[in-house]
Image (cartoon, rainbow, N blue to C red):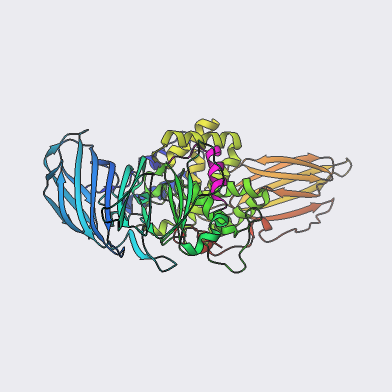
Amino acid sequence: MNLQPTTTAPARRAFRRQGFPALPLLFVLLLALCSVALAERRERVVGNWRPLHYDVTLIFNDALDELTRAETRLDALVLRERLAVIDLDFGALAIDGVSVGGRPARYERQGERLNVYLARPARRGERVQLSVVYHGRPTDGLILTNDKDGHASATGDNWPNRVHHWIPSLDHPSAKATVNFNVTAPARTTVVANGRLVARSPTRSGAHVTWTYSEAAPMPPYCMVVAVGEFASITPGVMLPARHAPVSYYVPPSDQKFAIQGFGAAIPSLKYFSQTVAPFPYAKLAHIVGATRFGGMENSGAIIYARTMFDPRENAPQSARFGVRRGLVELVAHETAHQWFGDAVTPATWSDLWLSEGFATYYAGLFVEHAEGRDAFRDYMRRNREEYLKYEQTRRAPIHDRETEDLNELLNANNYQKGAWVLHMLRAELGDAAFFRGVRAYYRAHLHRNATTEDLRVALERASGRSLREFFARWVYASGHPRYEATWSWDEGARARGGVLTLTLRQTQEGDGGAHFPNSFPVEIVAGANTRRITLTPRGREIVTRINLSAPPTDVRFDPEETILKELIVRTWLTRDTATWKRRSGSPVAASRVSSLSRAQTLPKRSRYSVE
């Protein structure tokens, strides 16, 4: 058995700093580290062996409600000396035979573990080829059900660790591998899978067809899927440059008329991410309306959406650019962004899930900004902020969560909305040039591999020349957000013209041993037709700045571009000789009080980006 605890070294490195800037922050982080040590989630990461390639053969019966025969051939790399057992994750399907190197092998089942015994201990660096032949109806992972038109269908739906119910595997995101699918299905159906279509061959009787797909780029096991159904297949009429992967849509016939418009954001988002991040990492991109428990699932090169994707939504906000529900645009952009973040670069552990979901959420917002303008982007980020603030009222936990046992509970506003805001704040701190340069470097360094939160931090530090240890320690490895009380007062001189503007920024959030959030805080000072911008740099929970001005300000705007995830109260004091004052606002200002949507409308897994 290869059961290992979650890797803790990256997170611990975050706390091994020289000249730690704040003793209270050190206290809260050490406290968090102690609690993690006592209640850390255990993950089955790659340890004794690593899968390199899967060759999966699936033969369906006519009703698409059973696998009459299946075989998974696995090429594995041995990672330690004298390995005697390859321990696969595998569900309850009946096994017809197991072999290693073409010879029958002894095996045993222990719950959802299939232990395959090698004839002799394998050496480190040796490659082992094994095969498992099986049949039956999977209990999960491969969903055998009717589509929205009532036709039988079969759809892979594996997140977070359900692929082993129909493919014997090492079912963890760290176990990336390439895959081939050979799928035999009734001739009336169309088969889609990861990778490019290599062959389509009718059987002798003509009643069935075998479809062969191959993907040479490694992917996490939860992204390995097939979709079998009576699809209408649509190729968009938009010409893509040769460097882009081919795009196609597969939908139930009843959705065919709306598919081109409904998937209107698919090609523009593909182009945008290819230009902003890197070329598309897989052989093709299919958008499929099938069966998934989520609103959408980002399987590599074969995104699958819920059967209700194109169903009408009463009073749903509309996209001015694409003429469809706003939620459709955000959904398609989110799942497309995952092809880069989550699929091509995959979180090393479940604690790093925000590197998938936070990135997809933020880059979907960047596409909204690109396609529909700055105001649409600011509205998008406000909605994400409100979802996080609602979530934080019910549960206080760090983004880098190493304790939650139920992986589905990680599909929360920490990993999605707060993760997106962390990226937005990093962009504001570092500037566009350094931020995007750092993200691209992070992507290139970990393309088709796994990455940790520390890998991202290091890439952004190298791109910017700044230390981000304190930022990551506070925003990713600790919990919560800042609550600011901002005060500005004007003291007019008795004889001379002008006066002094005093700005006070105080963090009032409770707990955390007095630790503060280190964000630079932008302020705009408006005096008549002139606007001056300054930045407050906190060294603790309170900062006071005094500025000489020739005329009293007409307005002072704290974080005017909304670049910090926060709650904010602003108060104004006016003083002239005697202590007269006016309270401007005793409650959180509009920047932190925007209309909100239900969580089901904004979390792409669990509802996995449901559509408005």
Q: Inspect this view and state whether residue 454 appears.
A: yes
Estimate the x, y position of residue 104 in percent, counting from the top left.
Answer: 11, 47
Estimate the x, y position of residue 450 in percent, counting from the top left.
Answer: 38, 40
Estimate the x, y position of residue 389 in percent, counting from the top left.
Answer: 55, 59
Task: From this view, report whether residue 442 is shown above or below residue 321.
Answer: above
Specify whether residue 270 is painted magenta. Answer: yes
Which residue is painted at 46% across and 37% down in the image? 443
Task: From this view, report whether residue 339 is shown above or below residue 262.
Answer: above
Q: Inspect this view and state whether residue 1 appears.
A: no
* Relative depth, front residue between 285 and 100: 285
Relative placement, left or right, of 191 versus 610 is left
In which image quadrant can residue 306 be found?
bottom left
Magenta-drawn segment: 264-282
Specify whether residue 533 is painted magenta. Answer: no
Estimate the x, y position of residue 431 in percent, counting from the top left.
Answer: 61, 37
Which residue is painted at 56% across and 59% down in the image? 327
Number of disc labels: 0
Which residue is painted at 48% across and 54% down in the image? 414
* Relative depth, front residue between 450 and 238: 238
